[in-house]
Image (tube, rainbow, N blue to C red):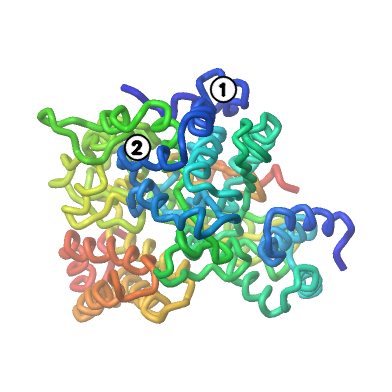
Amino acid sequence: MEKPLTQNIRPGEPPPSLPQYEKAGGYCAVWKALKEMTPAEVINVVKAANLRGRGGAGFPAGLKWAAMTSLEEAPAPRYLIANADEMEPGAFKDRYLIEGDPHQLIEGMIVAAWAVQADVAYIFLRAAYYPGAERLTRAIAEAYEKGYLGRDILGSGWSLDLHLHTSAGRYLCGEASALLNALEGKRAIPRGKLPRATTSGLWGRPTVVNNVETLCNVPHIVNRGAQWFLDLSVAREGKRGKDGGTKIFGVSGRVRRPGAWELPMGTTIREIVEEHAGGMREGHRFRALLPGGASTGFLVQEHLDLPMDFDSPEGAGSRFGTGTIVVVDDRTCPVAMLHNLEHFFAQESCGWCTPCREGLPWTERLLLGIESGEGRPEDLELLEMHTRLLGMGKTFCAHAPGAMMPLETGLKHFREEFDRHIAERRCPYR
Amino acid sequence: MLSEEEREAIAQELEHYRDPRAACVEAMKIVQHRRGWVSDDALAAIAELLRMSVHELEGVATYYNLIFRRPVGRHVILLCDSVVCWMVGYPAVREHLTERLGIDFGETTADGRFTLLPMPCLGSCDRAPAMLVDRDLHRDLAPERIDAILERYS
């Protein structure tokens, strides 16, 4: 089984230096793209590979790149940004890639920047990833020294500067348009959907924002081609899903061996949780899981054979999200867990739009009331009302709708637990 | 107000952006790294340097949970309270920390040694529960491991 993204990663060891990375075939994609391919050809191969965004939304990277306003209409400066603001509770895949093989991200960014003809690139890194910041700083310096960054890269006449920006907290900075405000030194509130960043992004210039894992896939697609990438995913009965490639899947929670693994896109939840994470820890039974972090809906026993690709969890009322699975056992109170989740979302709301700013703390208080034995039957109706009023399309960005996914599915799957809390006027788990 | 060293470090960051205000988060972090927090005077000096109004910069500063606008202890403990840590042991770790230090979230020990703050997911869910002390990540936490970790920070 091919593992292109993690082939150089040795957990517990320092990441490959630039010479080591090159020896393993690194930076070949920069040579190939700049020497043999036009930017349009790079975009076309990424489009053909159907590389979808690994940050949670799943938007095809090639289409995003193709939407970038043309160089004729909008010459320099143009920007490419790696979204490394990983803060989704349950997600730790980008940290793994950044710390394990920083040059892979930088190579992906150079190739992506060539494709969209960007002049300046930023890595927007969350503050708490200190080892990642150190490793990226060293790797960026190495890449400048070797001439992969800076002026006239490989004699192509094209120049690219790459800077590391480290943030100062707050989940919402990972929302692509809020990230642009954060990078401009403003409060990180989201921007309106239009104009798109590819037309008017950072400082009003054409800008592409891609997730770390998405960018890490780019060199391999350029080196090996779209068909190779598509063939990496799981085939069932001779047929493949439309999503190609591998995925860094993570499992955390009450399992024997929490961790992250690079597996074919479309691997079933059961295989990831039972084989790779070793199943439930001794004395704990499976109750449910969040397939892709805190902002995805609960899945239960009947969903374990679903393939983990972009569309399958969605069919079951959830979302693929970041592909990092949080497993919940039968001894964890689902109401208390939802309170923890909504506390997080309420705290991390930027406060810009009213439903999110007012609604999330309300759901948090309702859940705390139920958990503390003060819940009333009508509280469940209020919670359900919030799942509608804070749903997709009702708020400025996807923060509150994401927060409502575990709540909506939790109310459905754990209804009896809610009723017991209210009827017994206490949490039965305490 | 700002030292020569701070000004130089900020000037380096300015080179990365076409608009000086874009360096404001880095500038506040530079000052905070040396002084522990960002005082009103420091904030005003940074605003002037980056040609922002004090209120604009305050708006940015107060957005971020890791820009401190009040003094903190010599060491800052950021304990992850997100869902995975919560599920696998955060409550006991928090209880031990608050008992041991005699402070709750948002407070600083009387000797000025530690400030304790809650922190959203640290991306260490595979080795939960986790906390940062200053820039050091501590994972697989359990109450009985806490005292030995705290001893490393004087």
Q: Read off the residue under disc 2.
A: A247
Residue pictured at 19% horizontal, 57% vertical: A317
- Residue A34 placement (x, y as % from top left): 53, 33
> In the orientation shown, which residue stands out farthest toward the front?
A72
- In which quadrant of the rendered view does residue A133 lie? top right
Quadrant showing the N terminus of chain A: top left
- Residue B92 placement (x, y as % from top left): 47, 52
Picture layout, residue A185 above or below residue A152: below
Picture layout, residue A24 above or below residue B146: above
> In the orientation shown, which residue stands out farthest toward the left?
A237
- Residue A15 placement (x, y as % from top left): 57, 28
Give me the chain letter of mark 1: A
- Which class describes the residues within 10 Å of circle 1: few (<14), some (14-19), or many (20+)? few
Q: CA distance from mark 2 to mark 1?
A: 23 Å
| Amino acid carrying mark 1 in the image | Glu
| Amino acid carrying mark 2 in the image | Lys
> SS at mark 2?
strand
Give me the chain letter of mark 2: A
Q: Do the residues at pointers 2 and 1 share their chain? A: yes
Residue in front for this viewpoint, A215 or B41: A215
User: Horizontal placement of B80 versus A338: left or right?
Assistant: right
Which mark identifies residue A243? none
Q: Read off the residue under disc 1.
A: A22
Residue pictured at 26% horizontal, 72% vertical: A387
Residue pictured at 32% horizontal, 63% vertical: A338
> In the orientation shown, which residue stands out farthest toward the right?
B4
Sequence-earlier tag: 2 or 1: 1
